[in-house]
Image (cartoon, grey):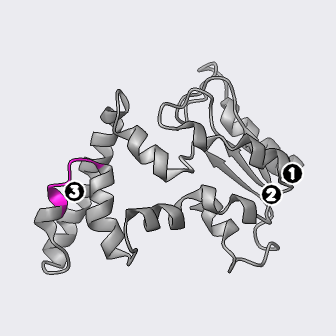
């Protein structure tokens, strides 16, 4: 959401936000959604799907005629849930339209605010498309760091340390501007 917001054309004032950091972001939904439904990632995907379905059920009690709840609850995974609920609810043409319009990768080239993306090299939820190294090399505003290890927002250090690596890196980025 942060990278999308900062990269949107309507965003033209960089004085309010002087820099941003994003962490463990599946910036390319087209591949990340499908990747989430495979192998060990299914553990995460099932949990995410269960959580969003529970939220929809809460809405059903308040807005009983707003959506086809039965169709939504029959979704087998997050991709189907998105297709059946999120896409029509927010007026997207289809899931491809949704992916293009909301994924951060669509907006990276338009960034005018220094933005750091930290995606660990072993993040199990990300695909190779979530590591846009060539874009980062060419961009004045988009910076990509691919730390060795860290998993999905892990970045653990000595348990006795006051701050972990990620906390230190974020503060350092904001203090030094890169």
Residue located beneath label 1 in the image? 177
Closer to viewer: mark 2 or mark 3: 2
- Secondary structure under tag 2 reads loop
Image marks 1 and 2: residues in contact by CB distance under 8 Å: yes
Which label is found at residue 59?
A: none
For the residue labelled by badge 1, is the local secondary structure a helix, a strand or a loop?
Answer: loop
Pointer 2: what residue? 114
Closer mark to the observer between disc 1 and disc 2: 2
Pointer 3 or 1: first along the chain = 3
Label 3: how many Cα within 10 Å (few below 14, some 14–19, many 20+): few
Residue interval drawn in magenta: 72-77
| Residue at x 34%, y 28% (from the top left corner) | 39
In contact (CB < 8 Å): disc 2 and disc 3: no
Q: Which residue is mark 3?
A: 54
Pick the residue in front: 73 or 174. Answer: 73
Above or below 68: residue 40: above
Q: Is residue 11 rendered to the left or right of residue 41?
A: right
Q: Earlier in the sequence, mark 1 or mark 2?
A: 2
């Amino acid at each position: 959401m942060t990278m999308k917001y900062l990269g949107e054309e309507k965003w033209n004032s960089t004085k309010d936000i002087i820099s941003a950091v994003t962490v463990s972001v599946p910036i390319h939904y087209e591949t990340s959604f499908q990747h989430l439904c495979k192998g060990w990632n299914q553990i995460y995907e099932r949990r995410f799907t269960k959580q969003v379905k529970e939220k929809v059920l809460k809405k059903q009690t308040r807005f009983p005629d707003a959506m086809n709840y039965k169709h939504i609850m029959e979704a087998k995974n997050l991709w189907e849930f998105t297709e059946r609920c999120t896409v029509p609810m927010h007026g997207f043409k289809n899931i491809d339209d949704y992916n293009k319009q909301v994924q951060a990768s669509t907006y990276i080239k338009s960034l005018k605010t220094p933005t750091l993306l930290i995606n660990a090299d072993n993040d199990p939820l990300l695909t190779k498309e979530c590591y846009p190294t060539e874009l980062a090399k060419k961009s004045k505003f988009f910076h990509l760091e691919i730390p060795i290890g860290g998993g999905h927002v892990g970045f653990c250090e000595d348990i006795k340390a006051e701050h972990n690596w990620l906390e230190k890196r974020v503060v350092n980025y904001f203090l030094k501007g890169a």
